[in-house]
Amino acid sequence: MKRSSNTRRSSTGHVPERTCIACRQVKNKRELVRVVRNQDGVMVDETGKMSGRGAYLCKVKKCWEDGLKGNRLEHVLRTAISQEDRNKLVEYQASL
């Protein structure tokens, strides 16, 4: 079905929201950092578009500390995180 030229899309549009696994706050997807598990391991997904199972954390050091503490991130991603991948995530946390 063809849209008529005078039909406009709503300017408010859909804004995707996600929940931080540490503080459990729901925020705009672009306000969070996605961590993804794929065949290459666990890594930060800067684009938010990599394929694989993802988890979201706020751009706050406290949330990263809580997310990396224990096995919370491992539980959400349903995998064990190698020490090498964990070190990369800690390095990213330090850059926040």
Image: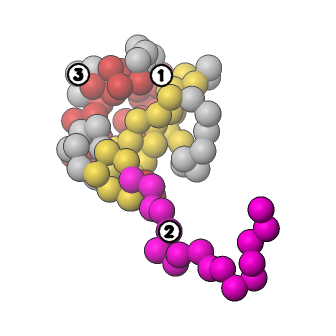
Magenta residues, as a range? 1-17
Reading the image, the residue beneath label 3 is 70
Density class for disc 1 (Cα within 10 Å; few <14, some 14-19, many ≥20) is few
Number of the label disc, if any, that sits on residue 84: 1
* Label 1 element class: helix
Label 1 amino acid? Glu
Left or right, residue 20 beside residue 42: left
Q: CA distance from mark 3 to mark 2?
A: 38 Å
Q: Main secondary structure of the magenta part?
A: loop
The location of residue 21, given as percent across then percent down, is 29, 37
Reading the image, the residue beneath label 2 is 13
Tell me the quadrant of the picture where the N terminus can be found: bottom right
Q: Quadrant of residue 83?
A: top left
Left or right, residue 84 beside residue 32: right
Looking at this view, is 83 or 8 the one in front?
A: 8
Label 3 amino acid? Gly
The location of residue 47, given as percent across then percent down, is 58, 50
For marks 1 and 3 on the same chain, the one whose residue lies earlier in the sequence = 3
* Label 2 element class: loop
Identify the residue at the far bottom of this view.
6
For marks 3 and 2 on the same chain, the one whose residue lies earlier in the sequence = 2
The residue under the point 42% across, 48% down is 33
* Label 3 element class: loop
The residue under the point 27% across, 25% down is 72
The residue under the point 39% across, 53% down is 17
